[in-house]
Each structure stands twice: as C-alpha cells, then as structure tokens.
Image: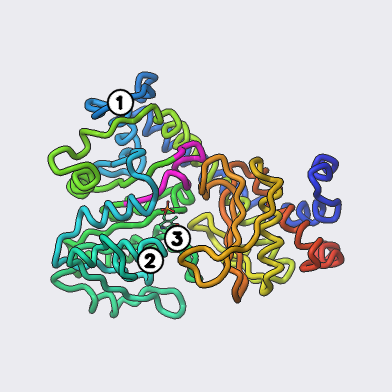
Amino acid sequence: MEQMYEALGISKEVYTFGEEILKELKERFEQIDEIAEYNQMKVIKAMQENRVAENHFAATTGYGYNDSGRETLEAVYASCFHTEAALVRPQITCGTHALAVALSANLRPGDELLSPVGKPYDTLEEVIGIRDSMGSLKEYGITYRQVDLLEDGSFDYPGIRQALNDRTKLVTIQRSKGYQTRPTLSVARIGELISFIKSIKPDVICMVDNCYGEFVETVEPSDVGADMVVGSLIKNPGGGLAPIGGYICGRKDCIDQCAYRLSAPGLGQEVGANLGILPSFYQGFFLAPTVVAGALKGAIFAANIYERLGFKVVPNGRESRHDIIQAVEFGTPEGVIGFCEGIQAAAPVDSYVTPEPWDMPGYDAPVIMAAGAFVQGSSIELSADGPIKPPYAVYFQGGLTWYHAKLGILMSLQRLTKRGVIKPQNLTNSCRHS
Ligand SMILES: *Cc1c(COP(=O)(O)O)cnc(C)c1O
C-alpha cells in the first residue's frame, strides 16, 4: 500500500502520519457507516414503494407529457424526504435556481421574507435583492428581514419573535454554514426553530436550504416540520452522477406553486421532457448515501490531521457533523495555495494543472480553486477553494469515494511540507505525541 501511495507522490512520513490519525477515527467512521446504511435502506424503500422500473429510464422529448420516469423520480424523492410532493428535474439548473424558484413561487408583492439564521448564501443576496440585482424579489415588492444568530451561535428568539409580522409569508433557514464561520445547524436544531416560529405564526411557510446536508443525518428537515426543503443535484443527492439539476420537496400546495413558476401558470408539473438524463438521477440518488459517507470521512480525516498540526479547523476534529464542508485556517497565503495544489494534484481529472489565485468577479480578494471534476463545478466531488485574505482559510468538501478524499488530503499535506508550511519533523513529532 505504501508503495502505491509513493508511486502517486506521497512520502512515507506523510503516509504514516495519516495512518496514525486514522487509527483514532475507527469509531467515528463506524458511526458514519451506520448512518449511510440507514439512508441506503431509506432510498431503496422509496424506490420500491414507487415501483421504479426499467421503463422509467427512457428518454422523453418535446413537452414531456405523461413522463412516467420523471413522475416516478419525483415520487421517490417525496417518499424519501417524507413530503407530499417533489419537483426534481434538469430544468432546475442548480441549487440557486431551485431556491429562487421556491421563493419567487411562494411569495407575492407585499409579502416579507425572513431569515432567522443570519445572512444567506452569497448567490441568494441577488435573488432576494440584498445586493440590488435585475429581477430580484425586491424589484417585485417583496421585502426582506434578517435576524442574526447570537454570538455563541444560538438563535435570537426574542429578535425572531419581534421580526415576525403580518407580512411575514416565508422563513428561509440555511442548514449549512456555507462559507461563513457560524456552526452548521443540526436537523434537531432546525426542528426547534421551526416549532418556535410556528408557535407564533402557524401559517408561515418554513423553507430549508438543504445544500450539502442531505444524508449526513438519518433525518432531514422535512421530518421536523419544514414545509419545503431545497437543494442541488450536483451536491449530495445527485451522488456525483447527476450532471445537472435541483430539487424542491414539500407540501403539495407549495410544490404546485413552484411548478407553475418553473414552467408556466396552467402547465405546472405536467411539462418538462427528461431528455434521457433520468438514469443518472436515479442511480446518483441510489449511491448518494455512501458517497456522502465518503465525503464525511474525508472531512473528519482532514479536521483531525490539521488540528493535530496546530491549525484551527471548523468544525473541529470531534464535533458532530451536519454538512460535508470542512474549513482549515492556515494564516498564510502559502497554506491556502499549497492545500489547493494538493487537492488538484490528487484529482482523477486535470491532475496536471496547477491552480492559481485569480480575481474572480464578485469577490474582493483573489480566490484559488481546486477541482478535478467529472461534472463542472460539482462540489460533491473533491474540491477546495479559499480567498487569499486573512485568516487565509481554505474550504473543502466532497470526494466521490473515501479513498480519493484520503489521497487528496495526504497530497495537500505533501504539498504543504514541500512549501515549508509544515515541517517534516512536525509529522513525526505529532505521531509520537499520540
Ligand atoms: C451551493 C449552495 C447553494 C447554491 O447552489 P448552486 O448549485 O451552487 O447554485 C445555496 N446554498 C448553499 C448553502 C449552498 O451550499
């Protein structure tokens, strides 16, 4: 094994260091496998209940009337998420699009949108109109209110009570921390928040941005009162196979609104040819629980490795996990760059290219990104990125298999050693320490 890793460019010291860390993670990994097993059964049950059959994989074209493959897939998602209805299709281009559809479909001029968990994901700022943008909800006369989390990451219940008003129609709750430093919300905490909100305003629609959270736990936000859960198929539930798509699962009346908004009033869910893409949606969903487990193992492995070497990691090495994102603070540009170089060098695709920081539109500092993906921009595949500015943190996620995630992390360590960010003696000292 050591020789195989050596052939890929991993030194004996780095490999041994990784194995030492891994020994301590056996129990954690067993827990992850158990969740994956449960979720695998949940997906199979949903597929059996809806009598998934070979004919559901056939392509449809044109209007796509009576597309039983599309309808059955949506029924499978609804069964799995325990919701009345679901909208799952390639016509939803990404997670942001799914969220924009869910919001704009269920809000009307004069309504107010509330985020009780602080600022939402960057791309939603323009959807909502927090940053002025063409076609935003703001342009349609929908206002927005936000209540930040308290210093310690808890909910500001008095603030939320005060923010809820006659016009509050929809509450958006983001499960994952995204690229912020707040903790990711567990499904249980989301459930508490929804109960509180519904106790004050029972008819308000509670929507959860579920991106990066699917299958990390055995329950989903729709099991604890969410009226809609929304996500991207090039993240967790696509299992790495879906080449495009988004989903919205939830209450029938909410999903109907979404369908009429996505296609057209009067048409709704009845149109939308699948163009032959459904096998990857079905198979990806089938594989998703184990793919997510692999990504989680990678995140925990990285947290423990870099924590041992003295870097700040969020979440830390022992915390329970509610999404697949791992942040590591290096404190120097070399740290961020070296880490990303390693992830890139370990990729099955484009491993020979060297990522470099560049001035991306919309960012106030150069950003470096590493991804060698089969699907462009897919972040369920092993990927990393970080802005070149203090605190010089890198965010990384994904890995279609645990072994690939492991190689990526070892390779990052290798590059950081080469760049002098990590001293070779630190690897051996830390081992002896444990
Ligand atoms: C990725 C992500 C989105 C947006 O999804 P895209 O597919 O990139 O458009 C929204 N919210 C969160 C929390 C995300 O992680």
Task: Give yes or no for contact between labels 1 and 3 (Cβ–Cβ under 8 Å).
Answer: no
Q: Nearer the viewer, residue 67 or 353?
A: 353
Q: CA distance from mark 1 to mark 3?
A: 36 Å
Q: Label 3, on which residue?
A: 176
Q: In this rendering, would 255 be left or right of 59? A: left
Dot 3: what SS? loop
Give x and y (percent) for residue 73.
Answer: 34, 33
Query: Residue 135, relative to residue 230: is it above or below?
Result: below
Nearest to viewer (mark 1 / mark 2): 1
- The disc at residue 61 is 1
Q: In this rendering, would 425 be left or right of 278? A: right
Which span is picked out in magenta?
229-243
Give x and y (percent) for residue 288.
Answer: 49, 40
- The disc at residue 258 is none
- The disc at residue 120 is 2
**Residue at 19% across, 40% down:** 268
Mark 3 CB within 8 Å of ligand 1: yes
Quadrant of the image for the N terminus? top right
